[in-house]
Amino acid sequence: MVPVTSGSANCPHCGQERPEHLVARNYLCRACQGRPADVLGQHVRLFNDMQAGPGGIRPTGSGALHDDDSRCREVEERAMAYVDGLAYRVVEGRFGGVFLTPADVVAPPASEVYPEQGCMDRLWRLQAISLADDVEWLKDGDFLTVNYLSGDPDYAVYGQLAPEEGGFHCEVVSNQFMAADDWPLNAGYLQQSGWHPPDEETPNWFRVVVGAEPAAEQLLLALRHGRGCDDARRLLWEPASFPGQADD
């Protein structure tokens, strides 16, 4: 990004020239203003929030909505949104409108900020929906592995599933491949949620789930609560085929 000082005629984010009427408050240009996101990188729509009362309609601050029209409480409460991962203050214009402007003190980028719980819960739900779309297309001979990027190449935290008659065979890595001393394991949660402990035939925790959406949801819940994977941004998966099945 091009560093721009306060009062410059250029956008503080992209460096492009801005209309003169935006210079005084050092707002981002129109193009950058149109790309605000929450800390997870999900686009939000900023607006002037209003509330009806005995004295009529009065402003109550700035509001933020995700693309599905759900409220983004994190952006609203922190009054901070991100463009390309960089933090900017959310401010209201004197005559209406909501704008982005550099913070008085440089704030950490989105990659260094842990989201509030509601925002993270929402991302887990979206990840489950996205995963279910890929699971739906699996056929006999296919499988799918969900990896959790731990940040350490020596630790492979994963879950996997494959179609079988009547549903999907799901597994979550056990202590045989990742010791509990190295990575959390909540065996009580897994057992209470219908997962079976490893046995002679299956070295991982396992269960059969009927339906693509329930299978995706249960696999991610097991990783999140059973194996201590707390950040949905670190999930990565890819469908594949067992050897000898790719051309069938």
Image (spheres, rainbow, N blue to C red):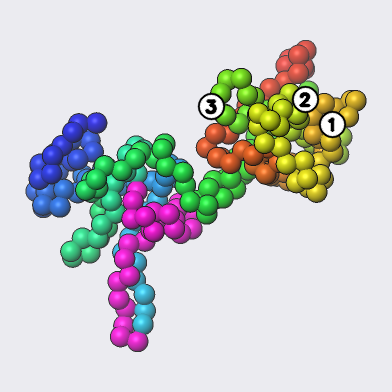
Does 69 appear in magenta? yes
Which residue matches tag 3?
Answer: 151
Q: Residues within 10 Å of mark 3 (few under 14, many from 20)?
A: few
Q: Secondary structure at mark 1?
A: loop
Mark 2 and mark 1: Cα distance apart in space: 9 Å
Q: Secondary structure at mark 2?
A: loop
Specify the segment rendered in magenta. Answer: 54-81
The numbered mark at residue 78 is none
- Viewer-side residue, 75 vs 199: 199
- Viewer-side residue, 145 vs 18: 145
N-terminal-most mark, 3 or 2: 3
N-terminal-most mark, 2 or 1: 2
Q: Position of residue 126 (x, y in %)?
A: 57, 45
Please tell me which residue is depicted at 24% across the width and 60% down the height of the picture. 92
Does 35 appear in magenta? no
Residue 132: quadrant of the picture: top right
The amino acid marked with disc number 1 is Pro
